[in-house]
Amino acid sequence: SKTYDIELIPGDGIGTEVVKAVMPLVRTVADQHGFEFETTRRDWGTEYYLNHGEMMPGDGLDRLTDADSIFLGAVGHPDVPDHVTLHGLLLPIRKGFDQYVCKRPNVLFEGIESPLRGYESGDIDFVVYRENTEGEYADLGGREHRGLAHETAIQSALFTRRGTERIIRAAFEAAAERERHLTSITKSNAQAYSMVFWDDIVAEVSEEYPGVTVERLLVDAASMDLIRRPHEFDVLVASNLFGDILTDIGAQITGSMGLAPSGNIHPGDEYPSMFEPVHGSAPDIVGKGVANPLATVLSWSMLFEDLGETDAADALWDVVTDQLADDAAPRTPDLGGDANTQTVVGDLSSRL
Ligand code: NAD
Ligand code: IPM
Ligand code: MN
């Protein structure tokens, strides 16, 4: 049977808890579908940083590059500034492996109560295509003049033709396969260079997809409309920063940060893709054993899907759907229950 090589980077905080907790479940599902995977666990993260002065070894990316896929928990620790930890581990992988499609589905599952009044399962089902290698996260060096009477800091954004066009094209492709409605998020009224450039490319690419309706929204209005009329969205495409922000809104209106999965996808064979829950290391609940593992399970589903193991991907997605629909099933506190991580995973396993 086929054996895949998967790199595991549990990282920090609840990242380590949820990554560990779901392993028996995902192994069982692989086994049931006739494939196996070998994992290499990398203990990189903030503890590694405190011991070695770097978040991962200097040749970290080289060690990962031959993998079939990568799974990451979360990065971030109260004792070390976030810009150090994130620029030392998570962001270099996304960028170094050219994982330019950040795919983040937002689905309101049956059994989950949205904080939005009147919304029921199936009413919210959209996917955000977030640009993942440049934009506002581009490392252009920055400049700062600190300690003077008039301090300044300069942080520029980078929008290349190649980078912008390929994420927009990926989103059009996704829309063509889904409900054929694409919403492009910008801030063209204030950002006259980058976002007008983005708008022009959307208009250009849209001519190749006459069957896809295109809506353009400013990011502030989009934030409002994700609350006001989330049922009308299908595929959203956004820059790195705007996509980051909108996917936290997406997670909350569909129930919890603890339910939101994501993929950092490098379409093509040159580099591995990386899958991770949308949430962070959650220092406020770390060590309590109550982190919701479902975002991690759904992210494994996306990983299996990406490997072409569609049946195993569906099995993981379906077992989560099944559990959430059962009001007698255990739930973690973020979903209003009092169960712990282990109990939730154990219940999932019993439903396979
Ligand atoms: P966070 O996602 O860690 O937590 C936000 C809130 O959601 C917290 O109240 C937390 O308890 C809750 N939450 C998150 N995941 C949960 C889960 N699985 N189950 C139950 N509740 C959950 O975001 P934050 O507090 O802004 O950031 C904490 C740290 O994580 C920071 O260092 C930040 O930079 C980092 N971070 C990392 C990633 C990542 O690795 N991809 C993503 C976001 C934030
Ligand atoms: C996410 C996170 C990261 C991002 C941070 C931790 C750098 O918020 O994956 O959504 O902004 O991409
Ligand atoms: Mn985020």
Image (tube, rainbow, N blue to C red):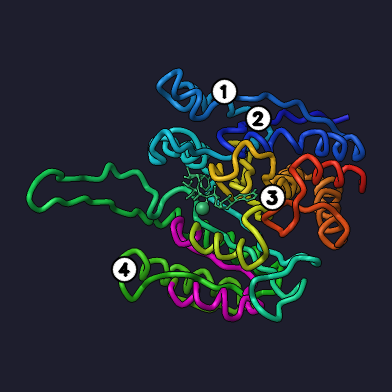
- Disc 1 crowd rating (10 Å Cα; few below 14, some 14-19, many 20+) is few
Q: Are the residues flagged by discs 2 and 4 in contact, CB closer than 8 Å? A: no
Residue, x 71% and y 64% (percent of image)?
107
Could you tell me how far apart the alpha carbons at marks 2 and 3 are, in whole angstroms?
18 Å
Q: Which mark is residue 191?
A: 4
Residue occupied by mark 3 = 295
Residue occupied by mark 1 = 63
Residue 260, compared with residue 253, is above or below; it is: above
Query: Is there any visible trace of residue 287 in the rendered image?
Result: yes
Residue 19, compared with residue 248, is above or below; it is: above
> Quick one: SS at disc 3?
helix
Task: Give the main secondary structure of the magenta stretch.
Answer: helix
Could you tell me how far apart the alpha carbons at marks 3 and 1 are, in whole angstroms?
26 Å
Could you tell me how far apart the alpha carbons at marks 3 and 4 are, in whole angstroms?
34 Å
- Closer to the N terminus: mark 3 or mark 4? 4
For badge 3, the amino acid type reads Ala
Q: Are the residues flagged by discs 1 and 2 in contact, CB closer than 8 Å? A: yes
Span shown in magenta: 220-243
Residue, x 63% and y 38% (percent of image)?
269
Residue 289, compared with residue 207, is above or below; it is: above
For badge 1, the amino acid type reads Arg
